[in-house]
Image (cartoon, grey):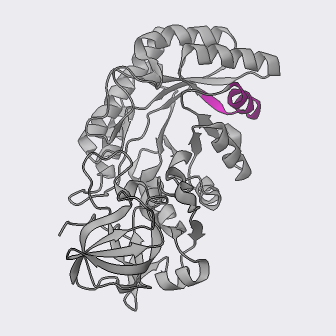
């Protein structure tokens, strides 16, 4: 029997069923159908509030839209965070549809097309430049539009975030501009008359080791100060990146945000003069929204094969690619999951939860310990608020998307 990941805090049981924001899973499924993503607005609010309490007051909080671009969720986050980070022209359209002021938005990512650059410049979005050529294109497009572009430089640092699930800096990368080349480019675009917006330094993501994050933030501040000195211009803003992870797998523990906030506060108290007037932010995606989401899928068949039990659901990897182990994990481990209609009941059997796709990759839980479940029961996959619906191949085999809902807590 393989262990399941830890179920996040904030969920309870009503009459032996999983409750999300005070509503029974079966009631939500009856109203909206399955498969279904449910996002708890109360948990989103609580997570941002706890993070603000832990971090220095000087630090702004940005939401990375790629984690979850669902419109109602974005609208809710707009009242909680200070800014938004996007990675495509499509995400720019999404934030504008959510009536988020583009001035609050920054745009990173390699391979920005001319139409995307033009739309961002016209809207007043800050572009985090990924190459010298992208800088020239942005200046040319701004000139044609008669709009002064708001430009920052994404820096490829000489270090990465130790223990991160995905390394975004250090060594040869398609992301950002090598640190040694940054001052010259910064002077070039400042001289060209852009609105200079500073640096974006992102070293990695999905880290649970507070000491590693503290060390990376310290290196980031040192690098920002050095590059600003070499540029010879005031640094208006510095995006320190993100990297805060959430527990997905057995043995994972939550990142210690209190320790990170205390260490960052100490560094802010002794910043060099070149950073005295700099505005700082961090950008987080999964840390803000991941644990607030649950994926509900209904068991449509229970079968036995060579002595193993398979719970076959109407969902699968086309909605929850990461939970199936096919989103970058080297060794497949089980996400937190449960039988939602028997939430908290004792383990009675070993079973694998599989989806409806014609591929053996479609497995949401592998030989996990569950109470007995039958046709009609609901399975809940937790940590589904980030990189779920929008990061999965929903059109695979013509299955189509799952329904998504944001619900407010019942008071």
Q: In which image quadrant can residue 401 be found?
A: bottom right
**Residue 228 against residue 342 in the figure, above or below:** above
**Residue 5 against residue 16 in the figure, above or below:** above
Residue 147 position, x and y percent, is 78, 23
**Residue 61 against residue 139 in the figure, above or below:** below
Residue 389 position, x and y percent, is 52, 57
Q: Residue furthest bottom?
A: 15
**Residue 193 against residue 70 in the figure, above or below:** above
Magenta stretch: includes residue 116: yes
**Magenta span: chief secondary structure:** helix
Q: In which image quadrant can residue 251 be found?
A: bottom left
Residue shown at the point (53%, 85%) measured from the top left: 27
Residue shown at the point (32%, 79%) measured from the top left: 303
Residue 151 position, x and y percent, is 62, 23
Q: Which quadrant is home to the C terminus?
A: bottom right
**Is residue 194 among the parts visible in the rendering?**
no
- Along the viewing direction, whichever of 361 and 262 lies nearer the viewer: 361
Residue 112 position, x and y percent, is 61, 28
Magenta stretch: includes residue 21: no
Q: Residue furthest left?
A: 1
What span is colored magenta in the figure? 114-127
Labels in figure, total: 0
- Along the viewing direction, whichever of 35 and 7 lies nearer the viewer: 35
Instruction: Specify whether 230 is left or right of 96.
Output: left
Residue shown at the point (73%, 51%) measured from the top left: 97
Q: Which quadrant is home to the N terminus?
A: bottom left
Instruction: Specify whether 95 is left or right of 353.
Output: right
**Is residue 32 among the parts visible in the rendering?**
yes
């Amino acid at each position: 029997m393989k262990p399941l990941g830890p179920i996040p805090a904030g969920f309870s049981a009503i009459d032996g069923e999983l409750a999300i924001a005070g509503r029974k899973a079966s009631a939500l499924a009856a109203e909206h159908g399955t498969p279904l993503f449910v996002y708890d607005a109360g948990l989103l609010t609580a997570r941002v509030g706890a993070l603000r309490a832990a971090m220095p007051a000087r630090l702004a909080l940005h939401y990375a839209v790629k984690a979850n671009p669902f419109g109602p969720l974005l609208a809710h986050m707009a009242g909680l965070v200070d800014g938004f980070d996007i990675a495509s022209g499509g995400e720019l359209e999404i934030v504008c549809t959510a009536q988020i002021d583009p001035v609050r938005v920054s745009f990173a990512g390699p391979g920005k097309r001319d139409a995307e650059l033009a739309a961002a410049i016209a809207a007043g979005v800050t572009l985090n430049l990924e190459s010298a050529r992208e800088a020239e294109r942005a200046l040319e497009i701004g000139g044609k539009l008669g709009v002064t572009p708001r430009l920052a430089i994404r820096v490829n640092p000489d270090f990465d975030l130790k223990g991160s699930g995905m390394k975004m800096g250090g060594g040869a990368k398609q992301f950002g501009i090598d640190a040694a080349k940054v001052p010259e480019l910064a002077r070039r675009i400042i001289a060209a008359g852009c609105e200079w917006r500073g640096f974006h330094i992102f070293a990695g993501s999905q880290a649970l080791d507070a000491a590693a994050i503290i060390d990376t933030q310290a290196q980031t501040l040192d690098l920002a100060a050095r590059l600003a000195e070499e540029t010879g211009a005031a640094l208006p803003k510095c995006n320190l990146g993100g990297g805060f992870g959430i527990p997905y797998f057995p043995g994972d523990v939550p990142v210690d945000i209190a320790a990170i906030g205390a260490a960052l506060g100490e560094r802010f108290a002794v910043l060099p003069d070149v950073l005295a007037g700099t505005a700082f932010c961090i950008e987080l995606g999964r840390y803000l929204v991941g644990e607030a989401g649950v994926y509900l899928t209904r068991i449509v068949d229970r079968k036995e094969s060579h002595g193993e039990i398979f719970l076959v659901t109407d969902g699968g990897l086309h909605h929850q690619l990461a939970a199936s182990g096919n989103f970058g994990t080297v060794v497949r481990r089980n996400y937190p999951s449960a039988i939602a209609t028997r939430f908290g009941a004792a383990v009675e059997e070993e079973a694998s939860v599989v989806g409806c796709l014609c591929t053996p990759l479609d497995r949401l839980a592998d030989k996990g310990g569950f109470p007995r479940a039958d046709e009609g029961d609901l399975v809940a996959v937790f940590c589904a608020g980030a990189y779920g619906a929008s990061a999965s191949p929903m059109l695979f085999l013509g299955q189509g998307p799952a329904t998504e809902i944001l619900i407010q807590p019942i008071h």
